Amino acid sequence: MSLEHVRVVTERGPRSGFPVIVAVHSTALGQAIGGCRLSVYADWRDGLEDALRLSAAMTAKAALAGLPNGGGKTVVALPAGVAPDRRAVLHDVADVIESLGGDYATGPDVGTGPDDMVTIGERTPYVFCRGYDSSPGTAAGVLAALRAVVADRFGSHDLAGRSFAVLGVGRVGGHVLRLLTEAGARVVAADVDPSRRSVADSFGAAWTDPHGCLTAEVDVLVPAALGGVLTRKTVPELRCAAVAGPANNQLDRPGTAALLHERGILWAPDVVVSAGGIIHAIGTELHREAPDRVAARIGGIGDTLTRILDAARETSSTPAEAAARLAGWLVDYPAKIA
Ligand code: PHE
């Protein structure tokens, strides 16, 4: 297989001793962006694999969001059962990012948050979301996508009375859950961390275990935690009409999109649904756009998704294929971005 990525750096962090991986997938449209993930992996090579896949997805995400950016990702592959020295890890990450000279900038992701971006910012300027949370922006984008999905499926954008299963109520999932209940939707939620039940309780949502949530009989399943939840094994168990959520890389492999399609389940590509965070960060920090302009751009996620679902229908392809086609076109012909 040929190397698609512009550059991949893997090093043993000199301070922390942990593998630090920064994958720059594309800089065709501009600086590569993508979050910094701190996760436990059985083998660091699994972390490398994740970085390669997640950075490629970020290229599509940025292009489909209309941003002048490419895709990248940082993964720190932690062994199980250690309590890392966070500062040491984040300074190791920062030095690798700084060595790339601005080709790549990071942001928060699974396992990191705004405070960690401040720590990275002590050693490199190439970091977004220093001290502020991008997850409300991501959640707002998810809501725009969910309105587009229910309109496509049920003929109205209205979320009131519709049912949703939110799988994962961390920073982004928690906001999605709140926005859905505020919009009058019926919500069931779950998380691998049972203590997060309080999030569901505080917004009047029902609680179940992760498998019960995945297989709940609802209008839309909203994966909002780790990727890889849609597989050959889980797709036959689903009892929802559609799947749309912010988790990155929801499909275990590209072919799973066809399984969903065959079952008549609409899958909204995660690269479209999850773009609210980067739209917010780039709009606010780089382009200094006013909040209402940024909010309008995030709302545009709904229109992009509608376009992709329509294109998929017209070309008898899956939404995943339609999104990949559009993303490829945007990367290859950047001048056409309005
Ligand atoms: N985790 C974010 C994503 O997957 C990454 C990010 C957020 C990068 C904000 C930059 C700014 O889209």
Image (spheres, rainbow, N blue to C red):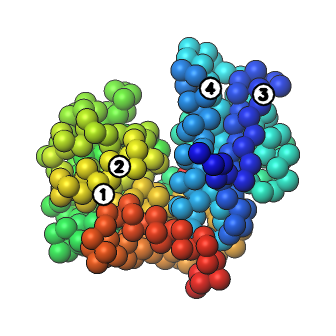
**To which residue does mark 3 refer?**
13
Q: Reading the chain from its start, which is encountered first: label 1 or label 2?
A: 2
Beta carbon of the mark 3 residue lies under 8 A of ligand 1:
no
**To which residue does mark 2 refer?**
255
**To which residue does mark 4 refer?**
44
Lateral position of residue 185 relative to residue 198, left or right = left
**To which residue does mark 1 refer?**
267
Q: Amino acid at mark 1?
A: Trp
Q: How many angstroms separate mark 3 from mark 1 (CA)? A: 38 Å
* Residue shown at 20% from the left, 34% from the top: 212
Q: How many angstroms separate mark 1 from mark 2 (CA)? A: 13 Å
Q: Say which element carries label 2.
A: loop
Q: Quadrant of residue 290?
A: bottom right
Between disc 4 and disc 2, the foreground one is 2
Q: Looking at the picture, does residue 284 appear above or below residue 22?
A: below
Where the C terminus falls, by quadrant? bottom right
- Provide residue 39's location: percent of width, then percent of height: 56, 30
Query: Which one is in front, 335 or 279?
Result: 335
- Provide residue 274's location: percent of width, then percent of height: 46, 57
